[in-house]
Image (cartoon, rainbow, N blue to C red):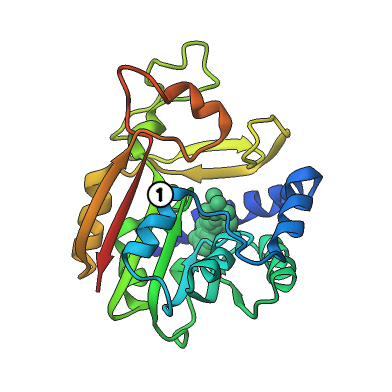
Amino acid sequence: MDNHSIAMITYANKAAWEASAHLHKSGHGWAQLMASAGRPGFSVLDETLTALLRKYHVDGRRSVQIGCNNARELISLASLGGVPELGIDQSPSFLAQGRELANAAGLELKLLEANIYDLPDDLGNFDLVLITIGVLSWMPDLSEFFRIVSGLMKDGAVLVVYETHPFLEIFDPHRENPHEPGFSYFAEEPQVSTQAITYDGENHGKVEPSYWFIHPLGEIVTACIHAGLKLQELTEYPHSIREPEYDIYAGRNAQVPMSYSLVALK
Ligand SMILES: C[S@@+](CC[C@H](N)C(=O)[O-])C[C@H]1O[C@@H](n2cnc3c(N)ncnc32)[C@H](O)[C@@H]1O
């Protein structure tokens, strides 16, 4: 994809995330997060991601998270002995929430407001790059994305991705028949949404249009390989790491893949 299209799409998505940010800082969820961030051993990482990070020796690794949102996962790395150093996100309002959480946790983090496609040159490189749920689908160009990710990695560094399985993206739990595929797995055009972006399954009204992509698993793996990364493992899971309305696709006899993890070394 050309740079102009990438810039247009990421600019629009920034506006949509910004317009949704205040919805993430209200209510019980935020209060609970703030209260727990200050407790020893704070972590929002689930069992799967925790085990994976331990397996790849997160302890002592200088870490960066891309699309860190409010940095709750980046901060959680400290509970595993990791060294959370840098969070990158293009939404200043979410990063401001991240600063509050980092303060509550007593951690000094650099939280950088930047479009991942347009990073400053002097960020240095890291021992661990973390990418978690809900980042890849916002990326208009995966080849360029993983080239940039690879540039943030030292030789021998580990990339850990824990994401929604792209196959799940073909379903829409809000449709009348939610088990009928609603989107093509091979759609090349972005899906356009005007819904406020939240994770609670509620309708919070409309915001600026945002553009998201279904990147098939083959495209994701190929983009990693072309970026010079050495794939260590790719694991698909039947469990959901999405909003609660996606739970209707879990625990079925005819089970679709719902999430996956990918680990690659530089
Ligand atoms: C779904 S959220 C990540 C949530 C996180 N995994 C968690 O559970 O807290 C995706 C994040 O990616 C960020 N993002 C989307 N496109 C971006 C881009 N081009 N550059 C930097 N950040 C971007 C959004 O601002 C948003 O905070």
Rendering coords of residue 69 (x, y %): 60, 59
The foreground one among 199 and 76 is: 76
- Quadrant in the rendering for residue 102: bottom right
Where is residue 241 shown, x and y percent of the image? 48, 40
Label 1, residues with CA under 10 Å away: few <14, some 14-19, many ≥20: few
In this orientation, does residue 60 appear?
yes
Residue at 48%, 21% (x, y): give it. 248
Label 1: state its secondary structure. helix
- Left or right placement of residue 63 versus residue 199 in this view: left
Q: Quadrant of residue 190?
A: top left
| Image x and y of residue 66, in percent | 48, 65
Which residue corresponds to mark 1?
48
- Measured from the top left, where is residue 155 in percent x and y? 26, 82
Q: Amino acid at mark 1?
A: Thr
Front residue (pair 58, 124): 58
Tell me if residue 210 comes above or below residue 123 in the rendering: above
